[in-house]
Amino acid sequence: MKAVDVKIQDERVQTVNYTGRSLMVTKAKILITGAPGGTQGATAGKIVEMALERGIPIAALVRNHDDRSKRLADLGAEIVIGDLLNLQDVISATSGRDTVFFCYPVRPGLLEASSIMAYAAWEAKLKLVVNLSQGSAVRWSPSPTGRKHWLSERIFSAAKIPTFNLRGGVFYENIFRQFAAGINENSELRAPFADGSSYVPLVAAADISKAALEALLNPQRHAGKTRFVVNELLSLNEIAKATSQCLNRKVVYKEVSIDEWMNEASQREDVATGNLEQLQHLNMLWQHLLLSNKSGFLPFLRMLLSLRGFFAKSDKVKIDSWLEAKKALFN
């Protein structure tokens, strides 16, 4: 497998993989943004992998050529260089596509990027934008990031862009990233979550990626819809019990103050580079979840999921299998 640089309409559209002597360049009809992945679940990168495994041509928008983009190119993805906050980059990247997965990280710029993508989608006459939103995307959310995601959804709606808003629960990958140090050092799940009996809506990043790819391949069935994807709802006490069973040692939930949690989170998150928005969102997320429990929404959703489990078997990842697969993360 060899990588070469080619020109497709714009010099920023580069790098395709090929074998043999001849080379035919055709723009992939699906564009994935955020494909190199971050620390929250790397859903975009998983979509690229899933599509290529099925023989579906796919393009990945990345900011720079690096080891992560090289890995995607080696898998067979078309690599597009561009910035979601640069209008011309996004117009060029979306030109000639049918569907786009819009994934913006937890950092400043979401509403500007949403506006840019909405305009580019209109100009490209896209059949669908799959907008990776959040479960906290409600008008009243205490999280500024949650409220911005709600506004992002409204931007696409007001622009009359065919959009599928994909609201995920809390990723297993994210919550155990927060808990890993406490589990390894003190066998504790440390969080400002009262007595630990309230529920957390959990989902595997891979299941979000599956739902997104299904929408990208079937735009007409998903346009104009919003879907909240949750695998299960568990309390932190239940999560501690599942972790104990997996690691064969007692792990408990321990309530900590907001100040304690913020101090621990600031040592873990991207605050050194100035990304205070991520830290603020993670802090406010616990408050959002407590409010959603007190309102009765999450307990009601747990009851619905339990009833559905009696009638239909789910192939979604559950905490036991996720923990077993990720056991190496813990001492």
Image (cartoon, rainbow, N blue to C red):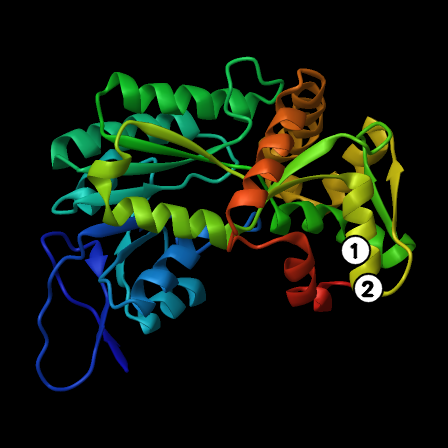
Q: At which x and y percent is residue 250?
A: 91, 56
Using the rendered image of the protein, determine whether residue 45 is visible from the camera's viewpoint.
yes
- Compared with 312, 1 (above or below) is below
Name which residue type carries label 1. Thr
Residue ranking furthest to the top: 140
Identity of the residue drawn at 53% across and 30% down: 135
Residue occupied by mark 1: 243
- Compared with 188, 307 (above or below) is above
Residue ranking furthest to the front: 311
Helix, strand or loop status at disc 1: helix
Left or right for 137, reference 55: right
Query: Which image quadrant for residue 163?
Result: top left
Identity of the residue drawn at 26% across and 81% down: 2
Sort mark 2 into few (<14), some (14-19) or many (20+) by Cα contacts within 10 Å. Answer: some
Identity of the residue drawn at 29% across and 24% down: 156
Query: Which image quadrant for residue 49?
Result: bottom left
Residue occupied by mark 2: 247
Q: At which x and y percent is residue 110?
A: 42, 30
Using the rendered image of the protein, determine whether residue 128 is visible from the camera's viewpoint.
no
Helix, strand or loop status at disc 2: helix
Left or right for 258, reference 200: right
Identity of the residue drawn at 77% across and 33% down: 262
Name which residue type carries label 2. Leu
Q: Are marks 2 and 1 in contact (CB under 8 Å)?
A: yes
- Compared with 106, 11 (above or below) is below
Q: At which x and y percent is residue 77?
A: 28, 64
- Compared with 22, 166 (above or below) is above
